[in-house]
Image (cartoon, grey):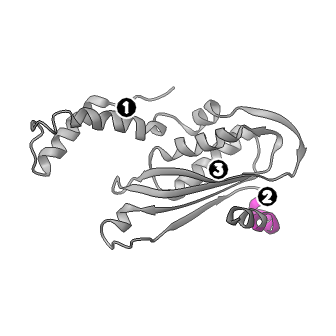
Amino acid sequence: MKKEIDSEKIKKAARMFIEAVGDDPNRADLVETPDRVARMCCELFEGMRCTNDEIAEMFGKCFEYSKSNDLVIVKDIDIFSFCEHHIALMYNMKCHVGYIPNGKVIGLSKIARICDMAAKRLQLQERICADIAEIIQKACGTEDVIVVVEGEHSCMTARGIRARGAKTRTAAIRGMFDTDHELRKEFYSLIKE
């Protein structure tokens, strides 16, 4: 069951934010801002409405595939998210997903949709990797999944240390990708091409 996002609370919070930073929410250019912020949040945080199980069910359209031990990779999936510590944008993110089919393959566009939904939450980059891996495992019925995410975090690049260009790379390594180092090396070499 999908949870609802409380648009009215978001509107009130946006008005309070505008006031807190010293502007007037009744100023002509800002009057509609709380409503726009609420609509934006409903879109940007859509993944918070669903559990990993629900995402796997929504985007788990698979097709029978009798071969085994074939490596499937989708790389360079663009995603973004918001860090849960500062609600700051994580951007320039690329997601790379690999898995070994277990009697079925998932529609390739569904992998991108899974990545997108897992990222549309207040997140940690490490958790984005883990969530995507878990959802792919559930949708495909395989333990053999690897997910790599690389991105920049505005909580590091735009404030605090201001380490512009610093990238964070995380990986969730499951099943054969954890135990078969040659398979893992093959994945890494293919995502670099």
Pinpoint residue 170: horizontal percent, then vertical percent.
Answer: 57, 63
Residue 66 figure quarter: top right
Can you identify the residue that label 3 sits on? 133
Q: Is residue 100 above or below residue 163?
A: above
How many marks overall? 3
Q: In this view, does 191 lie above or below 7?
A: below
- Amino acid type, callout 2: Met
Q: Do the residues labelled 1 and 2 touch (CB within 8 Å)?
A: no
N-terminal of the two: label 3 or label 2?
A: 3
Can you identify the residue that label 2 sits on? 176
User: Label 2 neighbourhood size at 10 Å, few (<14), some (14-19), many (20+)?
Assistant: some
Q: Name the side, left or right, on which 160 lies relative to 96.
A: left
Residue 75 figure quarter: bottom right
Q: Does the segment drawn in magenta span residue 2?
A: no
N-terminal of the two: label 1 or label 3?
A: 1
Q: Which mark is residue 142?
A: none
- Amino acid type, callout 1: Ile
Question: How far, Cα to Cα, is label 1 from label 3?
Answer: 25 Å
Q: Name the side, left or right, on which 88 lies relative to 94.
A: left
Residue at 55% x, 66% y is 169
Q: Name the side, left or right, on which 188 lies relative to 67.
A: left
Can you identify the residue that label 1 sits on? 5
User: Label 3 neighbourhood size at 10 Å, few (<14), some (14-19), many (20+)?
Assistant: many
User: Label 1 neighbourhood size at 10 Å, few (<14), some (14-19), many (20+)?
Assistant: some
Q: Give the range drawn in magenta.
A: 177-185
Q: Nearer the viewer, residue 75 or 148?
A: 75
Residue at 36% x, 38% y is 41
Secondary structure beneath label 2: helix
Q: Quadrant of the C terminus?
A: bottom right
N-terminal of the two: label 1 or label 2?
A: 1
- Amino acid type, callout 3: Ala
